[in-house]
């Protein structure tokens, strides 16, 4: 079986617009908040708790984060990542309708994964894999090998789309065909049409 594998963030989803609301929630300037939001993100994608992540962002910003604030930030953050690209949703629906085997491989915390699994677009995927559930993340070879095991697939049976070149390179390094995502035309150029 051939598998078509999609990243989530900025492939299926639009880029989050929640950062101003997150910065406001803890009372810091957006520029200061944003750099720490991204700089602290990797451990979150690799399985640390919501509170551990937000506490690390808060510490970097000089703000103490308690459980209640962490819960509020998590809710805002998840909502920010739920807005999806209409053209990509249409492509996924068409591919699913055509019987294409679709899988998702996303660097995302477990809390986001549980919400994402319940979204309408998720039904198009036969397998959903979130890094926060595994303790490893793209571009590590380990996460691609875990995915291949779940799919019972060989690397050459898979084509992977991701918006970040280093994740594309990680897939290529384990033998998975991969392209950097630049919109639905990327899928069309790779021979997948809706």
Image (spheres, rainbow, N blue to C red):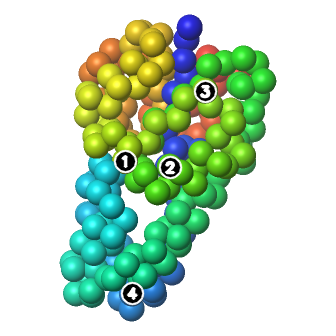
- For the residue pair 146 and 168, the one nearer the viewer reads as 146
Q: Residues within 10 Å of mark 4 (few under 14, many from 20)?
A: some
Residue 131 coordinates in the image, percent (x, y): 37, 42
Q: Which mark is residue 126?
A: 3
- Nearer to us of marks 1 and 4 is 1
Q: For the residue labelled by badge 4, is the local secondary structure a helix, a strand or a loop?
A: helix
Task: Kindly indicate the quadrant of the structure image that contains residue 83.
Answer: bottom right
- Marker count (numbered): 4
Residue position marked by numbered label 1 in the rendering: 132
Q: CA distance from mark 1 to mark 3?
A: 19 Å
Residue 49 coordinates in the image, percent (x, y): 33, 61
Q: Which mark is residue 113?
A: 2
Q: Which mark is residue 106?
A: none
Q: CA distance from mark 1 to mark 4?
A: 24 Å
- For the residue pair 89 and 87, the one nearer the viewer reads as 89
Q: Residues within 10 Å of mark 3 (few under 14, many from 20)?
A: some
The answer to whether residue 89 is visible is yes
- N-terminal of the pair, mark 4 or mark 2, is 4
Residue position marked by numbered label 4 in the rendering: 26
Q: For the residue labelled by badge 3, is the local secondary structure a helix, a strand or a loop?
A: loop
- N-terminal of the pair, mark 1 or mark 3, is 3
Residue 178 coordinates in the image, percent (x, y): 43, 24
Residue at the image point whose x is 45% and y is 87% from the top: 24
Q: Quadrant of the N terminus?
A: top right
- N-terminal of the pair, mark 1 or mark 4, is 4
Residue 148 coordinates in the image, percent (x, y): 40, 19
Label 2 near label 4: C-beta < 8 Å? no
């Amino acid at each position: 079986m051939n598998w078509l594998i999609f990243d989530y963030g900025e492939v299926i989803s639009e880029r989050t617009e929640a950062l101003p609301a997150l910065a406001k929630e803890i009372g810091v300037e957006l520029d200061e908040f944003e750099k720490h939001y991204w700089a602290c993100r990797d451990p979150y994608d690799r399985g640390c708790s919501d509170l551990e992540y937000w506490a690390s962002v808060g510490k970097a910003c000089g703000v103490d984060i308690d459980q209640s604030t962490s819960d509020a930030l998590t809710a805002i953050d998840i909502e920010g990542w739920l807005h999806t690209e209409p053209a990509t949703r249409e492509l996924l629906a068409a591919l699913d309708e055509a019987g294409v085997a679709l899988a998702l491989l996303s660097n995302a915390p477990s809390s986001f994964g549980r919400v994402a699994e319940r979204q309408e677009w998720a039904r198009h995927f036969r397998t959903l894999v979130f890094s926060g559930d595994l303790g490893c993340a793209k571009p590590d070879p380990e996460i691609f090998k875990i995915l291949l095991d779940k799919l019972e697939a060989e690397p050459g049976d898979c084509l992977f789309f991701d918006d970040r070149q280093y994740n594309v390179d990680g897939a290529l390094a384990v033998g998975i065909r991969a392209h950097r995502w630049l919109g639905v035309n990327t899928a069309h150029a790779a021979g997948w049409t809706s």
